[in-house]
Image (spheres, rainbow, N blue to C red):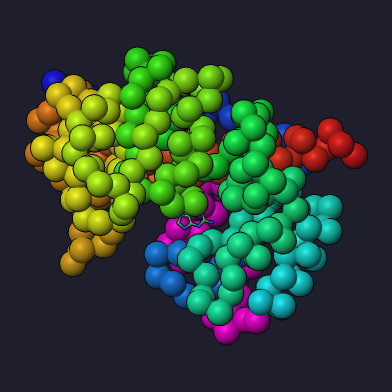
């Protein structure tokens, strides 16, 4: 029997245990530039989930043609506001805006997405006490929720994005998390099968529909699917779910796997940012 790692159920159960100061809840601002359809939907899910747990949130919806200078000014203003604990810039941004420059402008203390080089740098140095990257942390919490045997395993991550693959390799290889031996595969990887077949935990984050087939995985592996692509009227992951399920010991569905856990991690970061800011004033 393959265990279904239900991120929706896990995030609901974990959310009910969050402790929020209802008199003065955290306040998060989501910056949304333009009208990218998936971004509109993700931001509204994030806002709704914040409301469900009584975290305050505001959407700062900016025009597609905003200049980099104007966006940077907006972020500087939010950095200075005492009533704002978290700032999240929804990605992707329009082509004329330099992502690194925008993310670096966020006050690291308010970086609830944990995409600022300072926060990623802390993680690289082994500090897992601060804000943590949302999707990687959500994946870790999902596997922990199901009490899977995780310590010192062979992990293979397929995809080296700055939001998922790279920070995930940092998080899972920490002694304080699961002390994993991590292999990070990407387009330049010569023999993908040789790496994926060795993995006790295989994580697919490439953004290519049903890219991972049953031939890629080891019998009994845990398979985590980060991909989510709209194909006709269906949401499709990076893993060929039906065939891979026959071989995996545990697998995430798409949708309803990693996605809700990413939002749970955002709530955790927002509470942490709020507490850490209060502790320093
Ligand atoms: N776009 C897709 N996923 C994410 C995410 O986790 N954070 C942000 N800011 N943008 C995204």
- Residue 66 in the magenta stretch? The answer is yes
Q: Residue at x 40, y 30 (%)?
A: 182
Q: Residue at x 21, y 55 (%)?
A: 209
Residue 109 sits inside the magenta stretch = no
Give the percent coordinates (x, y) of residue 26: 70, 44
Q: Is residue 236 left or right of residue 163?
A: left
Q: Residue furthest front?
A: 190
Quadrant of the rendered structure where residue 122 is? top right
Q: Give the magenta-colored segment's residue range.
A: 40-67
Q: Is residue 173 left or right of residue 155?
A: right
Point 61% across, 43% down: residue:
120
Q: Is residue 114 above or below residue 69?
A: above
- Horizontal side of residue 120 vs 177, given as left or right: right
Question: Residue 55: x and y, percent?
Answer: 64, 45
Query: Does residue 23 appear anywhere in the picture?
Result: no
Residue in the foreground of this view, choosing between 250 and 35: 250
Task: Please state the horizontal and vertical placement of residue 139, each as a whole percent of the image.
Answer: 42, 35
């Amino acid at each position: 029997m393959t265990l279904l790692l239900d991120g929706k159920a896990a995030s609901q159960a974990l959310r009910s245990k969050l402790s929020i100061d209802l008199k003065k809840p955290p306040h998060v601002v989501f910056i949304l530039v333009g009208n990218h359809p998936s971004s509109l939907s993700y931001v509204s899910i994030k806002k709704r989930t914040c409301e469900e747990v009584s975290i305050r949130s505001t959407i700062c919806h900016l025009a597609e043609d905003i200049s980099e200078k104007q966006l940077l000014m907006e972020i500087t203003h939010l950095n200075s506001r005492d009533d704002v604990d978290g700032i999240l810039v929804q990605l992707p941004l329009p082509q004329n805006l330099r992502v690194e420059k925008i993310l670096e402008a966020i006050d690291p203390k308010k970086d609830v997405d944990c995409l600022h080089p300072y926060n990623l740098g802390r993680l690289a140095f082994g500090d897992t006490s601060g804000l943590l990257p949302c999707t990687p942390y959500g994946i870790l919490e999902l596997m922990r929720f199901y009490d899977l045997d995780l310590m010192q395993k062979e992990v293979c991550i397929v995809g080296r994005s700055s939001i998922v693959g790279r920070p995930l390799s940092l998080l899972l290889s920490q002694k304080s998390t699961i002390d994993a031996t991590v292999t990070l595969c990407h387009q330049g990887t010569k023999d993908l099968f040789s790496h994926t077949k060795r993995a006790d935990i295989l994580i697919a984050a490439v953004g290519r529909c049903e890219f991972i087939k049953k031939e890629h995985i080891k019998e009994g592996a845990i398979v985590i699917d980060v991909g989510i692509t709209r194909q006709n009227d269906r949401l499709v992951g990076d893993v060929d779910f039906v065939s891979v399920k026959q071989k995996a010991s545990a697998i995430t569905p798409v949708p309803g796997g990693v996605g809700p856990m990413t939002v749970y991690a955002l709530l955790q970061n927002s509470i942490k940012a709020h507490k850490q800011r209060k502790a320093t004033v």
